[in-house]
Image (cartoon, rainbow, N blue to C red):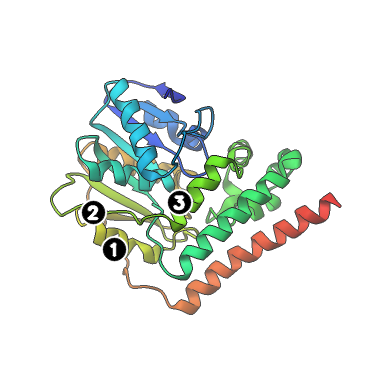
Amino acid sequence: MSLNYVRRGTGKPLLLLHGLGSSLKAWDLILDELAAQRDVIALDLPGFGQSPALRGEVSIPTLADAVTDFLTQHQLLGIDAVGNSMGARLVLELARRGNVVGSVVSLDPGGFWQGWQVAYFYQSVRLSAQLSSLIQPILPPLVSNPVSRTLMFAQFSAHPWTIPARVALNEFREFLPTPTFTKLLDSLAHGPPQQGAPSGSISNLVIGWGRQDRICPPSQAKRALALFPDAQLHWFSNCGHVPQLDVPAETVALILAVTEGRYEPQSEVPSLAKPSVSAETIFMGLSAAVLVVGLFLAFGGKK
């Protein structure tokens, strides 16, 4: 399979993998800064952007197979890798397999939800994609207005009004319930859980997590560390599910520090204790309410 990609810069190669319903454009805010120091390769994963869809099963393992084939084809095995959301889970899978990637930065990985969080993830993301599909004809004016842009990105960002309109437009152009999107969403929510890696098997792994992540709540970091005991955990303050959009400068600094072998763990790490059920439920309920209102307005506008 031939995957679409962009390659910029010089130096040690660095792979960027986007999340569900996105594309390589998800890295636009930090691509040039990374390329000033690294040979950056950003992929459109199969079925997203301009890459063809996989035939047959669509899951994290089959995506990992496709990425491994791409790296083999381009003689890039052992490349440092960064992923966000689904891409973050994907780089963890590649690291777990061994001899595929080098240093790894996993930003707000999916796949560590349990109980009610599974249904919340599945239904909220499904509704978001449906809403995005409905509002495609009026996207430009919506993303140009900071108020409507804030409502649209409330589920994904801690301060969505700061996301540039052009970046918001790119994201919502891609965030659609395509066959690949639907298959992956079902697999992520209801398929086999992410397997871990034994201690001592991954040499340089940092998991970054936004403290205001409304897709993968911060409490899930404890499960991620249990499955990947070699990982260091890096907290992003004032950040939602997509650090490269909310805190681009800090994200670049983290990626370069980890992949250059000079990352130092945070001196004061917030507790990993699970927040109260009531607080977390309210937090998620607010995001769900935004989706419901958005769908109501979208359907109402079509009448």
Taking depth in this image into account, of 265 and 274 the one nearest to the observer is 274
Kind of residue sitting beneath label 2: Pro
Q: Kindly give the residue lying farthest to the right in the view shown.
A: 303
Q: Position of residue 163 (x, y in %)?
A: 57, 44
Q: Residue furthest front?
A: 56
Residue drawn 36% across the image and 27% down it:
40
Q: Position of residue 263 (x, y in %)?
A: 23, 45
Of 51 and 222, nearer the camera is 51
User: What is the crowding at mark 2: few (fewer than 14 residues within 10 Å), some, or many (at least 20)?
Assistant: few
Instruction: Indicate the quadrant where residue 194 lies.
Output: bottom left
* Left or right side of 23 for 170: right
Query: Separation of disc 1 and disc 2 at Cα?
Result: 9 Å
Left/right of residue 147 with respect to residue 4 in the rendered view: right
Q: Are marks 1 and 2 in contact (CB under 8 Å)?
A: yes
Q: Is residue 45 left or right of residue 80?
A: right
From the image, tell me which residue sits under label 1.
Answer: 269
State the residue position of label 2: 265
At x 27% / y 63%, what residue is drawn? Answer: 268
Q: Position of residue 269 (x, y in %)?
A: 29, 63
Q: Secondary structure at mark 3?
A: helix
Does 65 sit above or below residue 7? Answer: below
Q: Quadrant of the N terminus?
A: top left
Provide the secondary structure element on which disc 2 rests.
Answer: loop
Q: Earlier in the sequence, mark 2 or mark 3?
A: 3
Name which residue type carries label 1. Answer: Val
**Decide: marks 2, 3 in contact (CB < 8 A)?**
no
